[in-house]
Image: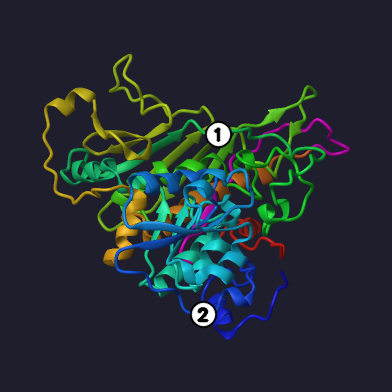
Amino acid sequence: MQKSTTSTNRRNFLKTTATAAAGFMIVPRHVLGGPGYTAPSDTVNIAAIGAGGRGRGTMDNLRTKGTNINFTALCDVDDVMAKDAREWYPNASYHRDFRRMLDEKGGDFDAVMISTPDHTHAIAGLASMELGKHVYVEKPLAHSIAEVRALTEMAKSNPQLITQMGNQGASGEGIRRTQEMYEAGLIGDVHTIKAWTNRPIWPQGGKLPAGTTPAPDHFDWNLWLGPAAMRPHHEAYHPFAWRGYWDFGTGALGDMGCHIIDTPFYILELGYPDSAEASVAQVFSQNWSADYNPETCPMASRILLNFPARGDKPPVKLEWTDGGILPNRPEELEAGEEMGEWGGGIIMEGTRGKLMADTYGNNPRLLPLSLNDQITVEKTLPRVTTFHEQDWVDGILQGYQPSSHLGKAGPLTETILMGNLAVRGYNERYPKPTADKPDAYDIPGRTRLEWDGANMKVTNVDEMNAFVGNRKLRDF
C-alpha cells in the first residue's frame, strides 16, 4: 500500500499533538476520508482489529454475556489465531490489514475494538477515530507517551466518540469500594503506595533472538511488524513473548500497571508524576561482564514514581516492583495471611492506616485484617451493573463515557510509561565492556529523571526524551 499525500485536516491534527515530529501516523489518506457510519438505535456493529489472542477474549465476553452487539468485520495478521472469531461470526468480512478493512468496510461498523500488540495500538486507534468510530483499546493505551497523548487529544476533540481502555478493574466493585473506604477517612491522607505484579510470565531480560525461523503461511510478518523496523522473522516474538521487547511491548509494568495502579491513581487524583527512578535486575556472564540488553525489558525491576502535593493532599511516593520482587511485608499482616494475591496487589499507606487490595483493585481490606469485621462503610457510589466491554457498548447506545474513557485512561497510561522511561534510563547508563575494560561490572546509582508531564519532557537528562515518542517508524 503506497503512502499518499497528507490532507490539510491531517496536517492540522498532527500540529495539535506532541507527536508531529514523530510522524507515527502511517495511514494512507484514503483511509481517513468520509463520514462515520451511524449506528442503528439498538445494535452496535463492531470491527475487531486483533481477532485472536486477547482480542478473542474480549469478543468472547461480548458474544457470551453481552447484548446489542454484532461483529461485522474481523482483522488479524494470523489466520490461525483468528479461527474461533471467524467461526463465531461467519458473515463478518475478514482482513489481514486493518487499513484495508477501514477503507473497504468502514461503512459496515460503528465501533472498533483494538487488541493488537502495544506498538500498533496508536495507528489503529487514531485511524479509527478519524473515521468517526468509537474505540475500545486494550491496555496499555499505546506504546509511547506521545502516542498516548495523541489518542487522548483525539478523543478530547471528538467528545461524541465513546472510548474505553481495556483495564477491566476500572468497571469493577473493588475500585468503587476502595474509594468509599478512602472517602470515609479510614486511612487518612495517603502518602505511600506499594504496587506489585508477578509478571513477567513470559521470557524477558535476555538478548534479541539470534537467526531466523520461517514465517508460516497463515501469518503475515510484515503486517505484524507494522511500524517497527524490519528484521528477520523469529518465532520468539509471536504470539506472546513480544511483551518483553521494547520495539513491540512495554514489559511487566506496561502489561499490568494499568490494572493495578488504576485504583490509587484515580481515587487520589495523582496526575502526572514529577520524577521517577528505577533499578533493574542484570545478568552477568562467567567473566562478570554485564550482559547489556537495551532492546529488551529487564527480568525484574523496582520503580519509584513521585507525585507532587495536590491542594491540601500530601505528596505521594509510589513503589512498583515486578519479576518476583515484592515490597516489604506489612507488619500488620499475621503469619499465613496473604499479601495481595497471586497476580499482585496494592497497599495504600495513609496517616491513619493502611488498605490492601488485589490485582484489578479487587477485594480491598483494611490492615490489620481484623478491622474489617469491626467497621461498616456505606455504599455511596454507582456501580457498573454489566461488565467492562458491555459498559462501552452501553455508553455508545446511551451517550455516556464509560469507566476508563481515554480522558481518564490517557494520563494513567502516560504515568505507567513514565516508569518505563526510568527503567530505560537505568539500562542506557549501564557500563558496557570496552577494549580497555573488558570486565566492566560496576553498577551505577539509579538515574532520577525529572518529568514535566504537561509538556511530556524529561528536564534533566535530555537524551531520554528520545524514548518519549519520536521513534523512527517504518512505512509498511
**Which secondary structure dominates the residues rendered in magenta?**
loop
Outermost bottom residue: 8
- Measuring from the top left, give residue 357's x and y in whole percent: 31, 34
Helix, strand or loop under label 1 = loop
Q: Is residue 111 magenta?
A: no
Outermost top residue: 335
Residue 397 visible in image? yes
Mark linked to residue 357: none
Residue type at mark 2 is Gly
Mark linked to residue 34: 2
Which mark is in front, 1 or 2? 2
Q: Is residue 436 magenta?
A: yes
Residue type at mark 1 is Pro
- Measuring from the top left, give residue 122's x and y in whole percent: 55, 61
Helix, strand or loop under label 2 = loop
The answer to whether marks 1 and 2 mark residues whose Cβ atoms lie closer than 8 Å is no
- Measuring from the top left, give residue 319's x and y in whole percent: 44, 39
- Measuring from the top left, give residue 259's x and y in whole percent: 41, 43
Query: Residue at 63% of width from left, 48% of height from top?
Result: 79
Query: In the rendered view, does 437 fall on the left or right side of 302?
Result: right
Query: In the rendered view, does 305 fall on the left or right side of 283?
Result: left
Magenta-colored span: 433-455
- Nearer-the-camera pick, 90 or 45: 90
- Nearer-the-camera pick, 426 or 205: 205
The residue carrying pointer 2 sits among few (fewer than 14), some (14 to 19) or many (20 or more) residues within 10 Å by Cα, namely few
Question: Splitting the image into 4 quarters, where does residue 60 fall?
Answer: top left
Residue with the mark numbered 1: 200
The residue carrying pointer 1 sits among few (fewer than 14), some (14 to 19) or many (20 or more) residues within 10 Å by Cα, namely many
Label 1, label 2: how far apart the Cα atoms are: 42 Å
